[in-house]
């Protein structure tokens, strides 16, 4: 029997996904006492029929509320309001905190239930477009084996000891020479070797911001910066993008109103959109940041994944007043699992960054640093980039053609000039990306749900597809499965729309 105390009003025109609206309504009724402990909720199919929505929306909402401890499920009996919450709620800002009034609504999809959903992408037989890594066949395993053997023969046990916190000296020199080819002028003493670009980002946040400080980023943005902000209790504000990157008019307003402590951007082949910030926008961003004395953290991890279009210098290469901290890595373009990245900073922040790095892990593993150094010296990276970018372009072209053939009419996407990703917007006449996900998994294909890249819960109909991870036949088949999953769920969605509300 349907619960007479369950009253839900949904806004179909809202950017907030239907399933999250449902979560919000049920959570509020439980917290207010309107739904008491032990109340049996409608079956997912019945509630979907009652509200005229996709059953997937109800399934996702119930799963989230169970993960939070609001509901409990009993096989053969149904879903009930839990007697006592067992999960730990996320920290909530104080009443006077600037973000307190929209804390719950502003969270992107990164909760436990959807993390569980993403794990489904690893099921055998699933064509997984959701990862952020290059394909395994791109990785120079043989070169790494030779490098490690050479380092161990040459350095012996020294290669297994702690390295100095700043990094292996010869590697810092090699990184200096490497970035100089990109136009970045720095000394080896300004380079800190890190555990990938993710640690570089985290170190900057810890060194420059304190709990409750504001960090501004693009919207959508790299999921890693959202994770870091949450872990460090940093407020995060996303600024919308246009085709040229972060909107500077809105950025300036945000600086004037909120006094951020840091701006994070990925100007080249931005994750997830694949957009490239043109030269004039880069100069304007630097001028703005310099005028208001706000440091900029540039994530350059995809900078050299260009296979067409004009080469544009990194922000750091244009920086004349030490406004920019530049994070890079050899994780995407060489060896992800070796976790070797770097951070370029001037003396204003460098000592503080080294102290934070030492507190985090003392040093990045010496063997990894020395092996990467040897591979760079042997020219392995240059060989990899040339070969990989040719293949990435081929795979992008296959993905674009397959998207045109199989994705539903009304879908939109970018045509990336580099990077790993296709940023797709589904038609709003059908299910959201989150609603589609389970059906896609059942059809044998996975993707990254677009909503989780937004700081404000937007992007409900967006998805990120990593076309780099699969060869042409798998890309073709994956797009075919994705289109089929959308059509089947959209049909169910349309049938439910026709049903009268009970």
Image (spheres, grey):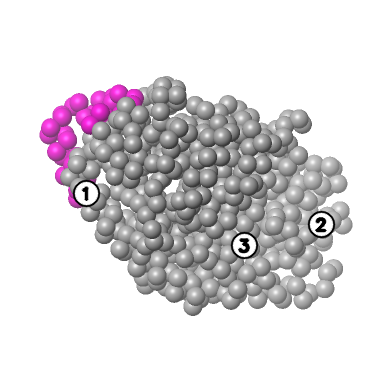
Q: Which residue is mark 1?
A: 380
* Span highlighted in magenta in the image: 142-170
Q: Is residue 116 visible?
A: no
The C terminus sits in image quarter: bottom right
Whole-angstrom CA distance, mark 2 to mark 1, is 59 Å
Q: Which residue is mark 2?
A: 8
Q: Crowding near pointer 2: few (<14 within 10 Å), some, many (20+)?
A: some
Residue 146: within the magenta? yes
| Main secondary structure type of the part rendered in magenta | helix
Is residue 160 located in the magenta-colored stretch of the structure? yes
Label 1's element?
Answer: helix
Measure the C-alpha gap from mark 2 to mark 3: 22 Å
Which residue is under mark 3? 461
User: Can you say which quadrant of the picture contains the N terminus?
Assistant: bottom right
N-terminal label among 2 and 1: 2
Between 112 and 77, the one lying in front of the other is 112
Give the percent coordinates (x, y) of residue 74: 68, 52
Residue at 77% x, 50% y is 26
- Residue 201 lies left or right of residue 433; in this view the side is left
Residue 477 vertical position relative to residue 300 in the rendered view, above or below:
below
Query: Tag 3's secondary structure?
Result: loop
């Amino acid at each position: 029997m349907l619960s007479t105390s369950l009253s839900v009003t949904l806004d179909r025109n809202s950017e907030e996904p239907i399933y999250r609206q449902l979560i919000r309504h049920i959570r509020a009724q439980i917290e207010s006492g309107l739904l008491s402990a032990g109340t049996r909720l409608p079956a997912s199919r019945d509630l979907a029929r009652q509200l005229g929505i996709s059953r997937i929306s109800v399934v996702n909402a119930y799963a989230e509320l169970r993960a939070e401890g609001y509901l409990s499920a009993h096989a053969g009996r149904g879903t009930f309001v839990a007697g006592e919450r067992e999960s730990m709620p996320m920290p909530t800002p104080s009443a006077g905190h600037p973000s307190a009034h929209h804390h719950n609504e502003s969270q992107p999809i990164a909760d436990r239930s959807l993390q569980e959903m993403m794990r489904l992408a690893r099921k055998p037989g699933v064509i997984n477009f959701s990862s952020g890594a290059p394909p395994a066949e791109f990785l120079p395993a043989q070169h790494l084996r030779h490098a490690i053997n050479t380092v161990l023969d040459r350095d012996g046990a020294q290669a297994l000891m702690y390295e100095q916190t700043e990094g292996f000296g010869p590697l810092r020199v090699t990184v200096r020479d490497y970035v100089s080819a990109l136009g970045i002028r720095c000394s080896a003493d300004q380079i800190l070797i890190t555990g990938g670009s993710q640690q570089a980002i985290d170190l900057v946040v810890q060194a420059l911001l304190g709990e409750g400080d504001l960090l501004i980023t693009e919207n959508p943005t790299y999921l890693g910066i959202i994770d870091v902000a949450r872990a460090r209790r940093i407020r995060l504000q996303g600024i919308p993008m246009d085709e040229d990157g972060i909107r500077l008019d809105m950025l300036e307003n945000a600086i004037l109103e909120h006094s951020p402590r840091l701006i994070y951007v990925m100007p080249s082949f931005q994750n997830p959109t694949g957009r490239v910030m043109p030269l004039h926008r880069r100069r304007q961003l630097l001028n703005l940041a310099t005028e208001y004395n706000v440091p900029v953290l540039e994530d350059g991890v995809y900078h050299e994944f260009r296979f067409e279009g004009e080469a544009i210098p990194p922000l750091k290469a244009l920086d004349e007043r030490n406004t920019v901290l530049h994070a890079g890595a050899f994780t995407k373009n060489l060896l992800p699992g070796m976790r070797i990245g770097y951070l370029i900073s001037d003396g204003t922040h460098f000592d503080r960054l080294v102290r934070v790095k030492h507190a985090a892990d003392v040093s990045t593993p010496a063997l990894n640093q020395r092996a990467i150094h040897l591979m760079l010296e042997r020219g392995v990276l240059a060989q990899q980039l040339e070969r990989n970018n040719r293949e990435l372009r081929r795979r992008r072209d296959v993905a674009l053609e397959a998207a045109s053939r199989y994705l539903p009419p009304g879908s939109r996407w970018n045509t990336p000039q580099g990077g790993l990703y296709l940023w797709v917007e589904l038609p709003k006449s059908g299910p959201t990306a989150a609603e589609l996900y389970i059906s896609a998994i059942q059809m044998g294909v996975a993707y990254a749900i677009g909503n989780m890249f937004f700081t404000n819960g937007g992007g409900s109909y967006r998805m990120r597809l990593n076309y780099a991870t699969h060869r042409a036949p798998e890309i073709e088949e994956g797009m075919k499965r994705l289109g089929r999953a959308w059509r089947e769920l959209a049909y169910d969605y349309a049938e439910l729309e026709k049903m009268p509300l009970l």
